[in-house]
Image (cartoon, helix red, strand yellow):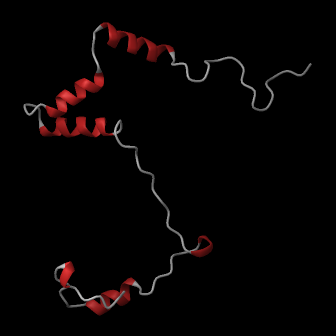
Amino acid sequence: MPRGAQAGERRGGRTKGIPNKRTVAVTEKLEALDRDPIEGMARMAMAESQLIRLRAQMYKELEQYVAPKRKAVEVTGEDGGSVKTEMTVSVWLDSVNGKTLGPPNERAKPYI
C-alpha cells in the first residue's frame, strides 16, 4: 500500500475556513470585554482631541475594510514589447524648451 498523500489530497491539520486557536482566543477575549476594535479605531479617528497623526493612521487602517487594495498594472505594447509613442520625451522637451505651458485650458495641443 503506497504511503503519503496523493496529489491534491489533504491530510490532517485544520479544516479550511475554521479559525485557528489564537484567533478564536482573541475573539473570545474581545467579546468578554465587550469591545469592538473597528469601533474603537473609528472613535479614535473621529476624536478631534487626538493627534492628527494618530487620526490619519486610524482612517488608513479602517480604509482596508471599505475599499479593496489596488494592484499595480503593467503596461506593455504589442506582443508584450515596449509601448510605442508618437513623440519621445526628448522631442517634446525640445518643442517646449523655454516656453511656459500656462494653464491646461489655455495650452495649445500640437503634440496630440
Quarter of the figure with residue 108: bottom left
- Work out whether residue 90 or residue 31 is closer to the camera in this orientation and state it: 31
Query: In the figure, is residue 89 to the left or right of 85?
Result: left
Residue visible at 63% across and 73% down?
79
Residue furthest out toward the left: 49
Residue 57, above or below 105: above
Q: Which residue is at 40% across, 46% downward?
A: 69
Q: Is residue 46 left or right of residue 65?
A: left
Q: Position of residue 66 (x, y in %)?
A: 34, 39
> 14 and 68: which one is in front?
68
**Residue drawn at (17%, 79%) of the image:** 103
Quadrant of the snapshot with the C terminus: bottom left
Q: Position of residue 41 (x, y in %)?
A: 24, 28
Q: Position of residue 39 (x, y in %)?
A: 25, 24
* Residue at the spot 20% in from the left edge and 91% down from the top edge: 98
- Of all residues shown, which one is farthest toward the right? 1
Question: Residue 16 at x, y = what percent?
Answer: 60, 23
Q: Residue 29: name its quadrant.
A: top left
Q: Quadrant of the N terminus?
A: top right
Q: Is residue 14 above or below residue 38?
A: above
Q: Is residue 80 above or below residue 102?
A: above
